[in-house]
Amino acid sequence: MKLKRRKRNGTLITMTPLVDVMLILLVFFMVTSSYLDLNMIPMVDRGEDVQNPTQSQGNVGATLLIRIGSDGQARFRGQPLGVAALAAAMQETPDARVLILPSGFADVQALVGVIELATAAGVTNLRVVRLEGAGG
Amino acid sequence: MKLKRRERPAPQETIVSLIDVVFFLLVFFMMVGRMDATSPFEVSPPVSSAGEDMPAGGSTVSVGLDGQLALDGFEMDTEALVDRLAAQVAQNPDLFLRINAHGQARLQKLLPLVTRLEGLGIKDVVLVVTPNPS
């Protein structure tokens, strides 16, 4: 006698829960993520000795001072700061360390603008200083 | 004579293409998005073209326009912030710290804070900037 094997129904995998989970994940990532393109400017370098910065930097040459007024205007050697003047000073003294002394009433954008300008002038040794107890 | 309308077979809607699209979108948003704690107040970082690419991870200190402070999305005062960061540095001496300051915030709020953070021994502090579009 020939037995006929009963055909089994194929296991049915429903895709609906998978789609549900993926949609939830999609909405989650769309809502919680931020898509701003942000960059950074180092404020404290890894290799820098924060307690004794002058010792860790070895023998530096001249020091150039850039002041930022409370109105955000930067001045170098008594003149409004320009890339050309700073680049010329850097050519005279390539090892020069540049100090930025901002007023506490200047805003962050002014400081960032001066850092940008100094970078464009080829400054590599840059530090922001402030007067203790002078409101910044 | 009564005509019997022939029943049309229901069109089979395949959801495979939907899954493909959703999966593609999911991977896209996971790749391009950045999951940072948002600050509890408005912060518009300064604009600069001198910035470098910022790595992920670390902690974020937000500085608002009026000097409000927040650490990883939680607003707090200076002392609480310094205490928490001191605890974090004790656990992880190589802590990477971002300062997300409002572009119009006064430096008298920012610079003393940076000095205190340096005093904690944090060696990797960066200022968040928005790239200049021009």
Image: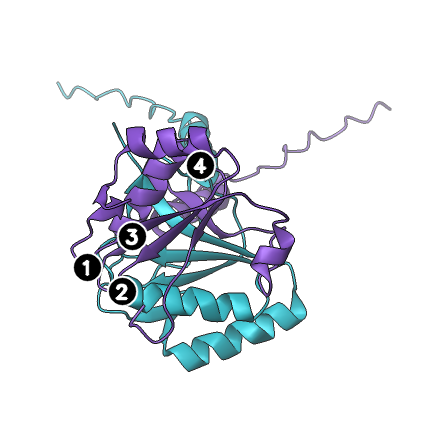
- Please tell me which of labels 2 and 4 falls first in the chain: 2
Residue at left offset 31%, top offset 44%: A114
Res. B72 visible in picture: no
* CA–CA distance in space, label 1 to label 3: 10 Å
Residue appearing at x 17%, y 19% in the figure = B3
Few, some or many residues within 10 Å of mark 4 (<14, 14–19, 20+): some
Dividing the image into 4 quarters, which one contains the C terminus of chain A? bottom left
Distance from disc 3 to disc 4, alpha carbons, whole Å, reads 16 Å
**Secondary structure at numbered mark 2:** loop
Q: Are marks 2 and 1 on the same chain?
A: yes
Crowd around label 1: few <14 · some 14–19 · many ≥20 (10 Å) = some
Question: x%, y% of residue A133?
Answer: 34, 76
Respond whether the residues carrying marks 1 and 3 are from the same subunit: yes
Q: Secondary structure at mark 1?
A: loop
Label 2 crowd (10 A; few <14 / some 14-19 / many >=20): many
Pointers 3 and 4 within a single chain? yes
Q: Colour of chain A?
A: purple
Q: Nearer the viewer, mark 3 or mark 2?
A: 3
The kind of residue on which mark 4 rests is Val
Residue tagged 2 = A104
Question: What residue sits right under mark 1 in the picture?
Answer: A70
Left or right for A70, reference A122: left
Q: Quick check: marks 1 and 3 in contact, CB under 8 Å?
A: no
Which shade of the palette goes to chain B? cyan
Q: Are marks 2 and 1 in contact (CB under 8 Å)?
A: yes
